[in-house]
Amino acid sequence: MRPWTRRRLLVSAASGLAATTAAPATAVPAAGRRDDFLAALRALPGLRVIEERPGAEFGYRFFLLGMRQPVDHRNPAAGTFEQRLTLLHTSASRPTVLFTTGYKAVLTPGRYEPTVLLGGNQIGVEHRYFGTSRPAEPGYRNLTIRQAADDHHRIVRVFRRLYPDAWISTGGSKGGMTSVYHRRFHPHDVDGTVAYSAPNNVDDRDNSAYIRFVETVGTAACRDAIKAVQREILLHRGEMVARYEAWAASEHRTFRLVGSADKALEIAVLRAPLMFWQRGTAADCAAIPAPDAGTDALYAWLDRTALLPLYTDTVARDFIPYFYQLGTQLGYVDVPTRHLAGLLRHPDAIKPRTFVPRDIPMRFDTDAMPDIDRWVRRHGERPRPHRDPRRRRPHTRVRGPPRGCARRTGQPVRGLRWAALRSASALTEASEAATVRSQRAPTCAPHHAPARHRSVPSSPS
């Protein structure tokens, strides 16, 4: 990063934090100045101001926007679609944070950690094919990491006309991944990238890190309790499925995408260990029901842990593009099943193909994630410790502490986990961690969600 950019971000962070601890002395801008900004916003090419919404913090304005994007950036003749954006505007002289969840847009105002630290503007990007940002063409052939990166590139180019100061890109989980992909293909677009809890599955055929994690995390007693409850649920499959179907009928929910309530239940059972450790801690082991606790307790635990509504069409159809990406470029997990021998009926039930309609072709691109890995290894920096089981995929270590990025519960797992801001109180360290050298991607992230005033839509995994 250029020294002048670092200095600007340091000053912005200091003034941004000061603004969060003291009420501004200035009044809301006059109507004329507000109208001037709105006119400038409407003058941006390809941008539509849908509405200005209330609820923004003092000193900010919140807009819902639509930006016309090519369906295929390589082929202008393929047509366009409108991509949903949000904007939290405070001043054209402040830094700008480009934010995405990697899914649909967040349509309520709320500043994320880098925006709070820098006291900056914030542009939220809805990922193509999610929410309302859907091309009219059938299928998902233009849902690739490069096409999404090109979306972000056009957004930066257009909005730099309004915001010429420093830019930071950020996101958590899939949003962090999306920020890194943007940076890989357009390294000069932003001055820094903060990717929280962002995995990179280099070899989708190798699930050893996930399996090793599930088989070693926590205590042996807790792991055995989870295995026992998985077996007991499947031993009572008939009653469990009937209960699941009755609940779905009462809520007018169906299982057409997955195939049946029986298959959905099996998927939930298989995913339960990863989801338990993703959201829980060792303290939650005491709440795992004993095998003889009864079917009411077993069903309630599975519902609470694996979130049974996820596998119904009402929810699952919203995540078809997510699973399409997993099955064509991003890769996915596998889980231990030896302890469930003789109880499983649906081979490959948790594979992404289960969650994508059969008439949509899927072919896995084995070069996509190795390319990201090579780029991050060359340009990444500042690895940090990490704890989410979904992020424990083995892949090449990036520059940084030789061992600190890869350990939890004493088990080494090779991996890159990209850099995150840690504390709003350490201005210099925060600004350094929040930025990456020009042409550099972020590195290793802890599993700490960005500090924010509202929640990010969670993925079904």
Image (cartoon, rainbow, N blue to C red):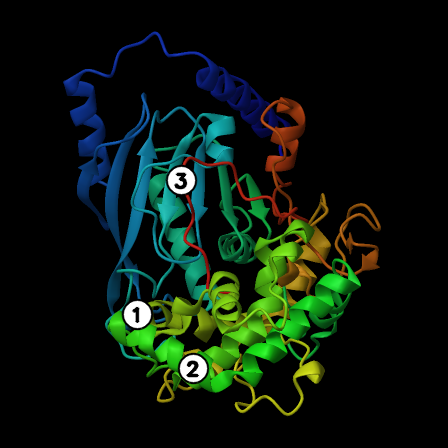
Q: Which residue is mark 2?
A: 241
Q: Which residue is mark 3?
A: 454
Decide which of 167, 204 is in the foreground and name it.
204
**Residue 165 percent across, percent down from the top left:** 45, 30
Residue drawn 46% across the image and 32% down it: 115
> Mark 1 belongs to which amino acid?
Thr
Q: Residues within 10 Å of mark 1 (few under 14, many from 20)?
A: some
Q: Residues within 10 Å of mark 3 (few under 14, many from 20)?
A: few
Residue 66 relative to residue 452: left or right: left
Q: Earlier in the sequence, mark 1 or mark 2?
A: 2
**Residue 444 percent across, percent down from the top left:** 68, 49
Query: Residue 377 appears in which quarter of the rendering?
Result: bottom right
Instruction: Give me the C-alpha separation between circle 3 and circle 1.
Output: 23 Å
> Mark 2 belongs to which amino acid?
Val
Decide which of 214, 321 is in the foreground and name it.
214
**Residue 127 percent across, percent down from the top left:** 38, 58
**Measured along the vertical axis of the image, is residue 123 above or below residue 137?**
above
Q: Which residue is mark 1?
A: 314
Circle 1 SS class: helix
> Mark 3 belongs to which amino acid?
Arg
**Measured along the vertical axis of the image, is residue 120 above or below residue 192?**
above
Residue drawn 69% across the image and 62% down it: 392
Query: Residue 94 appears in which quarter of the rendering?
Result: top left
Decide which of 94, 358 is in the foreground and name it.
358
Residue 434 relative to residue 304: left or right: right
Circle 2 SS class: helix
